[in-house]
Amino acid sequence: MQGTVYERRITELSLAEFLSYGPQREEGVAGKPLMRKTKDGKIVSWTVETDDSACTLKEAFEKVNPSIGFNIELKFDDHIVYQQDYLIHVLKAVLHVVLEYAKDRPIIFSSFQPDAALLVKNLQTCYPVFFLTNGGTEIYYDVRRNSLEEATKLCLEGGLEGIVSEVKGIFRNPGLVNKIKESKLSLLTYGKLNNVPEAVYMQHLMGIDGVIVDFVEQVTEAVCKLVKKPDEVLLEGEEKVQNRPQFSQRELSFLLKLIPELIQ
């Protein structure tokens, strides 16, 4: 029916149904329209800068340059309480493809679902696993998702390699960065604010290990210009040392105020 939107989870679709949505591989064939639901429940058109047909994980491994690493995010519904047997079934299906086709490609697994993150760590020993968290910027029924402190606890107890936090969660609690690093965990961030070069540079100063951004080339170039030290002068016989300024909690709090709309 014209104007009617049917909401279905990807896990409810067969492979053929999944591939029938969006742009199609065969020239002249129109796929079923894709829509998306915003956090406030609105249904809007699916729009991206460049469209392409959907593919499977196996095809991504086969067609993407093998030197490019993958961050495989294991997605689950925020509002469903999953049984362990179901999680294991899904994770084993993903791992089967990864172990068969990834070869030597760099890979990390990540998930907002705490049990999924712990299980995928226990089901394989080849790849690091990171726990995704909003860092307290949103609240969930599962308390393990509600703070950086809980994320750190989960990683340490489950043997995970690190945390990927919404960047605002880090900027609201800059003092936790050192505690996380002292726990021997890697710390990455994601979020729209990471498209602001000054925000990424601030994280460089704080010791963040990496950032997830939308505009990789532009942000990289801008941050490189900020990182360069114009007063770097070496005396004869001295070794070049990469200096990273060390800030106290009070100094960091002051510097963070320089980034507009940081904690809005």
Image (tube, rainbow, N blue to C red):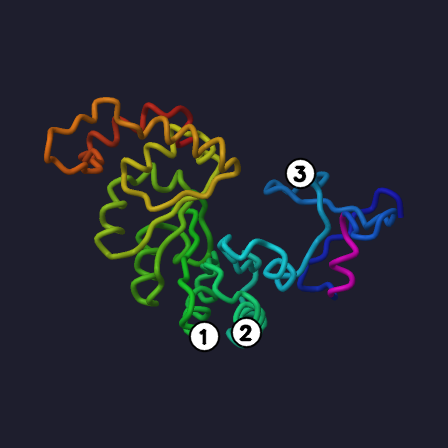
Which residue was labeled with disc 2?
92
Task: Please state the horizontal and vertical placement of residue 93, each as a whole percent of the image.
Answer: 59, 72
Q: Secondary structure at mark 1?
A: helix
Question: Which residue bears the numbered disc 3?
Answer: 48
Q: Which residue is mark 1?
A: 123
Q: Nearer the viewer, residue 239 or 101?
A: 239
The part of the chain drawn in magenta is: 15-22
- Counting residues from the N terminus, which is met first, the one under dot 1 or under dot 2? 2
Where residue 57 appears, as percent x and y from the top left, is: 62, 61
Would residue 210 be found to the left or right of residue 19 on screen? left
Q: Secondary structure at mark 2?
A: helix
Front-most of 18 and 86?
18
Q: Which of the 4 image quadrants contains residue 246? A: top left
Amino acid carrying label 2: it is Lys
Residue 20 position within the rendered picture, expressed as x and y whole percent measured from the top left:
79, 56
In terms of depth relative to the viewer, which is nearer, 229 or 148?
229
In percent of the image, x 74 and y 46: which residue is there?
A: 34
Pointer 3 local density, CA inside 10 Å: few below 14, some 14–19, many at least 20? few
- Residue shown at 57% from the left, 68% from the top: 101
